[in-house]
Image (spheres, rainbow, N blue to C red):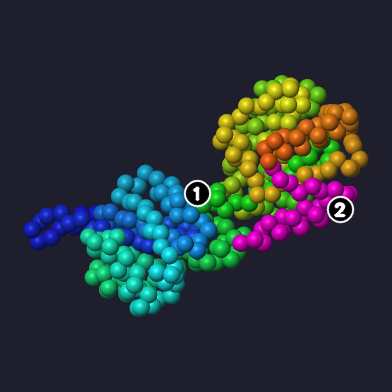
Amino acid sequence: MDFFNGEKNLVMIKAFVFGKFLPFHKGHEAMIKFALTKCNFLTVLICCSDKETVSGIIRKKWIEETFKGQKNIEVREFNYTESQLPNTSKSSLVVSKIWSKSFKQEFPDYSLVITSEKYGDYVAEFMGIQHILFDIQRNTYQISATAIRNNLFLNWQFLPNRVKVDYAKKIVILGTESTGKTVLSNKLAAHFNCSLVSEAGREIISNSNSFNYSDLLLVAKEHSKQIQNALTGDSPLIIIDTDIHITKSYSKFIFKKELEVSKEIYNSNQANLYLYLNNDVEYEQDGTRLSKENRDLLDKSHRNILEEHKIKFVEIKGNWVQRFAIAVNEIEKLISVK
């Protein structure tokens, strides 16, 4: 956008928006898009309190990656202590005056601030610049960061995909063969009405007694891909049937060699909760599984791999009803933590 003064010289309009962006949501995204149409250059200032647990680095990445390719925008962190600067979202002349001093130091040559709050008028007045109000009635998106923090499940759709990746909760179901992993995974996904990542190995390896090392590499790659896709799905909760540690265990158990996978593939499998199914249930041979003896030896291999990688898990024993009840309880404990 070009602005000219009376002498026909180009005037650079520099503007800023500010907020905690905790989390960054689609309402914020809409405001930034609007702000970009009102200036030549825009700064997004992330106000990071010493009392907050989500780092400014993470919030900065959310916004930068959402607006990747946009040239006339920068994202800055503004770290402060609540003992020095009041931490409030209410419109207050006193608070606005205090913050305006810091903003003036940050933006001495900026002429515009854009907000969705009444206090934007106060800040602009104290700074001696213009304020443009954006959608104070929240007609574009009826959402706030507070509402998302209070109920992530209800407001999941208001998060941009880049933010969803960091807020998704992954639960992995582990165990040796014939312990009910797939049945339990499906029941849990239905119970919580959430995303499900099925065991990729079932599509690639049809028989546990006949496969190659290269097949395990394909399993690891495909499973990682499916997990990544699920992160931006319709639910913040993802149930994952088996993971990379089990694939690594098969490699050690069958081929006596380490499964070499990239750091990206391994890290994509990291979960918030691991549930390990004990082999204290009746063994069922469907013609594609290992013998009962090898199945129980594989259980030991799984546990060794998990210990090597320092993976802590909740062990689940008992009959099918008991297992489901324990799993539900563990997941509910996880998602109840804000």
Is 121 magenta? The answer is no
- Position of the N terminus, as image quadrant, is bottom left
Look at label 1 and name its amino acid. Answer: Arg
Residue in view at x 55 percent, y 48 percent: 165
Disc 2 element: helix
Identity of the residue drawn at 34% across and 51% down: 74
**Of residues 226 and 262, the one drawn nearer to the viewer in this rendering:** 262
The spot of residue 143 in percent (x, y) is 50, 65
Circle 1 Cα neighbour tier, 10 Å, few/some/many (<14 / 14–19 / ≥20) = some
Can you tell which quarter of the image residue 290 is in? top right
Identify residue for label 2.
Answer: 321
Give above or below for 53 relative to 313: below
Left or right: where 141 falls relative to 283: left
Instruction: Give the vertical position of 251 relative to 191 (above or below).
Output: above
Question: Where is residue 33 shown, x and y percent of the image?
Answer: 37, 56
Q: Which residue is mark 1?
A: 162
Q: Magenta stretch?
A: 311-338
- Does residue 233 appear to the left or right of 308 in the view shown? left
Which residue sits at x=57%, y=31%?
Answer: 262
Location of residue 10 by image quarter: bottom left
Q: Position of residue 78 (x, y in %)?
A: 38, 59
Residue 75 position within the rendered picture, expressed as x and y whole percent measured from the top left: 37, 53
Amino acid type indicated by mark 2? Val
